[in-house]
Image (cartoon, rainbow, N blue to C red):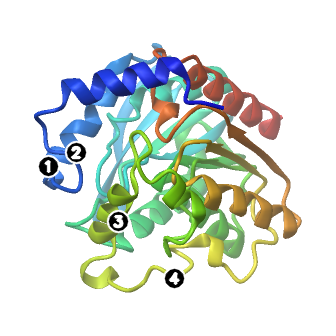
Amino acid sequence: MTLDPILQAFVAASEAANADRPAIPDATVAEARAGYEALAGLGAGPDLFSVADATIAGQAGEIPIRIYRPNGDTGEPGLVFYHGGGWTIGSLDSHDPECRKLAERSGCVVVAVDYRLAPEHPYPAAIDDSWAALQHIAANAGDFGIDAARLAVGGDSAGGNISAVMAIKARDAGIALRQQMLIYPAVDARMGWPSHDENAEGPFLKKVTMEWFQLQYFSGEGAGRQEEVNASPYLAETLAGVAPAVVITAEYDPLRDEGNAYATALMAAGVTVNATEWAGVAHAFFQLGPLLPHAEAVIDHLAARLRAAMS
């Protein structure tokens, strides 16, 4: 299937509008972050019962979070959400519309985690913050209006990587998750999958962009640690016993093959998996609603899977 014509037109318009701006890998980290935040301006999410910023204590200081409550009830299911952005860009604001939509459509209290970013805080800082946040939310679920027995993790791209790692760590720590929601996850940092080359010039995420993100993330104390399980969950000794998974991949995404392979590995380990490769779309399509019908459809799909997992 060819690239969706709406998406193709948007890519062409974006490239024309940003022709004078440096692109990764020529952009500075600050420029890359500013460009990514612009995605949040494509359309605001729905109003909810409440949206509140707070902090959680982490190993290296306070971790900002944002709590999305679709209603005023307590004892609701909860989703801990980790944003994408190559562990280098992205924020609570970059994924605010998507978190609002997921909360409204799934009925979950969504808690978005603003983990520390590279290169200022290289691997494993993002994992440390994400795990500290998940442990705190699981242990204090009632404070968030969440039923501790109905908790899930999820995220896109780098956030999908973090979510997969959190599911492994939760299994090992005895935290029972109802679901791991992996949206085009980066699960193998060895950079050796065919789609990395097949879609090397793909819209929104190119192979050189992935290499730049890795340069930031695996710098300093993180250098040379790509094959650790907390960096590459695909390399885990066993995936048996992790939470049931929903895996979303995109046809024109460099991360397509590793995401599909992770879904296969989960199934081989006996994990219940709902895996879908979305045709005609590329990396970041999850963030392109309401411009792209596929974006709204994938959020509907994810919300439905969350509702089913929490019932």
Return the mark for residue 227.
4
Q: Secondary structure at mark 3?
A: helix
Q: Quadrant of residue 41?
A: top left
Q: Quadrant of residue 97?
A: top left
Q: Camera-side residue: 235 or 280?
A: 280
Residue at horizontal 46 percent and vertical 30 percent from the top: 287
Q: Quadrant of residue 73?
A: top right
User: Which of marks 3 and 2 precedes in the sequence?
Assistant: 2
Give amino acid for label 1: Ala
C-alpha separation, residue under disc 1 versus residue under disc 2 = 5 Å
Q: Secondary structure at mark 2?
A: helix
Residue at horizontal 78 percent and vertical 38 percent from the top: 310
User: Which of marks 2 and 4 precedes in the sequence?
Assistant: 2
The residue indicated by pointer 1 is 30
The answer to whether marks 1 and 2 mark residues whose Cβ atoms lie closer than 8 Å is yes
Residue 300 pos. (x, y %) = 67, 23
C-alpha separation, residue under disc 4 versus residue under disc 2 = 26 Å
The residue indicated by pointer 3 is 211
Nearer to us of marks 2 and 3 is: 3
User: Which of marks 3 and 1 precedes in the sequence?
Assistant: 1
Residue 202 pos. (x, y %) = 44, 44
The residue indicated by pointer 2 is 33
Give amino acid for label 4: Glu
User: Which of marks 4 and 1 precedes in the sequence?
Assistant: 1
Q: Is residue 48 above or below residue 266?
A: above
Query: Does 299 sit left or right of 287 as displayed?
Result: right
> Would you call the spot at circle 2 few (<14 residues within 10 Å), some (14-19), or many (20 or more)?
some
> Would you call the spot at circle 3 few (<14 residues within 10 Å), some (14-19), or many (20 or more)?
some
Q: Quadrant of the N terminus?
A: top right
